[in-house]
Amino acid sequence: MSSAAAAFRLGQRVDAAGDPRRVGTVRYLGPVEGHAGDWVGVDWDDGAGGRHDGSLAGRRYFVATGECSASFARPTALSGGIPLPDALRLRYRGLIKAVLHVPDLRLLDLTGNLFSQWQVISPLCQALASLEVLNLTNNTMENDVAETPMLENIQILVLNNCGVTWELIEKIKVSFSCISELHLMSNRFNMIMTPDGKFVQAFNTLWLLNLEDNHIDSWDEIVKLSYLRSLEQLHLNKNRLKHVKYPSNLLPDGPLDDAAAVLFENLQVLLLGSNDIDDFSSVDSLNLFPSLRDVRLSDNPIADPAKGGAPRFVLVARLGKVGILNGSEISPCERRESEIRYVRLVMGKIESTDPEEIKRLHPRFAELKSFYGIEDEKPTSSTSGPQKMASGLISVTLKCVGPSMGEKQPLTKKLPSTATMGKLKSLCESFFKLKDIKVRLFVEEEGCPVPQLLEEDTASLMELGIGSGATIVVDEERTTVILGAGAVAMLGSRCNAVTVMVLNLAATPIELSLIVPFLRLGETITGSGHFPLTADALKNVLTGHASKDVLLSIVHAMLGWLIAAPFVLVVLYAVSFPCFKVLVNRFGGIPSSPRTPIKAV
């Protein structure tokens, strides 16, 4: 092997000479059949400029992470970086002595460098006696670790996107015995492997563990963390979990000295966003965590009404002890309204009369029904006439916001709890005298930035959990629905008919300008000449000298719209859906966990 190739080693982090942003890991050193000299096989991060998967001309030299993430390069075309002291000299020049003697340095951010060996990191940390935070994000660290020195001063360790496994964490946990925060995002591991295959131990001071954006798909792996008594926050967003289950009994293979331990004893924050949870039993099991107060379930099928999941009020009612849901605080008023509405929802849909079956499907139903003193909303045989009718009435407030509806005062009406959405739409057209206007109904919920659409015309008020005191927003179907929804999201309770009408008027020129492309499309399809959009043509239209041309242009525009409409609607849906998700995330609460890079203090 040439001296140039000998300067590299397997597992070393390198970048392309002249392009430090192109970074990879050395996976092969030696000859390549059919090519003279020595070569270095590199597996490039994110497939940056790769050509194959580690095999060439039918022979495999190494296994790359992707089908086209690897390539062979001459040693002279790669750089192994420069030592840290040299980098400091280049960066600070005359201040190098001051930089190398920083007794009070508390944070060391080495994000995005070419470190890979702990033998290099450990002496550096030892030399900084006051160091508390070590950030090695985007450095692919080797999982083979020799004995490392004690680094008891470090409290926060960040190993995001470092290619580490839990086996490495088990090897270095003795060195980092006083760690309080451990961040392991984007490492793509799916198992928490301990030496005995059972439970994670030690980490006596760890209160925050961040495992976001990994590939964990079994809750059994998370149960291995249940004996970490100091753990208060567990971040599991963007994994592949399908179910959550609190281990109600102490596991038989748990630590012997923890016979009286309470599992997840101090866990207060559990972030489960963007997983695959789709069952209510997982939601109900969160009530069994003894200290849980903050839960994130957003972007799971169970929390997405568009995918058959539950709206926010159902989740609030099922989670009796949680004070923060999806980053938004649950106020006492919201909890009360959600729980009452949930009870009515269950009463409207429940089919079984078996108490045990009801308790299995709705564990909190009987408790909430009794707590709020809610009676079955079914008229008894002893009532008749007006009393029988009144016993099933609920009071709701109807609020008109459609721009074409004019300024109308909200109305409070008593309606039968069995009234369907289709019937309510007809009543709204009558109440507000909405002739030839197709209405859409929304229900306002505290804690939700955007009113929830009531789509199912056959569903009744009781089946939707809508009870007395609810506010239903009456809107109209129109082309500026995106602006209207944006107004509702941003203005909240201040949004009314006037604000929506102003937005509608502001969008009118945009709507009119869309006629032109549809007109041109219709003319192209029929092979007709283009109708001139000039001042003279406009003058002829206004004076009545171009009536035939105007009618023909209208026909062409309608033809163009009929042909383009399916494609336009698909594009609008594809663009609008992520925009609405951004609006909800923006106005619905704080993000799951901080993503701001750590900066030096």
Image: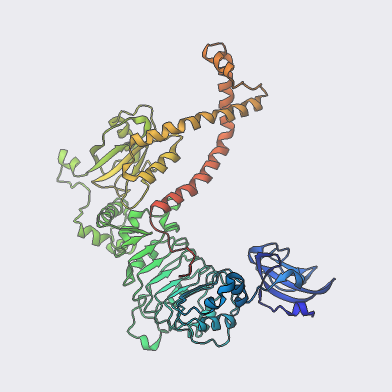
**Image quarter of residue 47:** bottom right
In the picture provided, is 401 more to the left or to the right than 87? left
What residue is shown at x 67% (from left), y 62% (from top)? 48
What residue is shown at x 28% (from left), y 43% (from top)? 471
Total marks shown come to: 0
Q: Determine if residue 183 is in view.
A: yes
- The picture places residue 419, in percent across and down from the top left corner, at 29, 41
- The picture places residue 223, in percent across and down from the top left corner, at 43, 75
- Give the position of the N terminus as an image quadrant: bottom right
**Image quarter of residue 272:** bottom left
In the image, farthest residue toward the front: 94
Q: Is residue 320 above or below residue 33?
A: above
Q: Is residue 203 above or below residue 353?
A: below
Q: Is residue 331 above or below residue 506?
A: below
Q: Is residue 494 above or below residue 265?
A: above
What residue is shown at x 40% (from left), y 86% (from top)? 255
- The picture places residue 16, in percent across and down from the top left corner, at 70, 67
Task: Name the one closer to the observer, 385 or 583.
Answer: 583
- Give the position of the C terminus as an image quadrant: bottom left
- The picture places residue 317, in percent across and down from the top left corner, at 30, 58
Q: Determine if residue 139 is in view.
A: no
In the picture provided, is 353 more to the left or to the right than 67? left
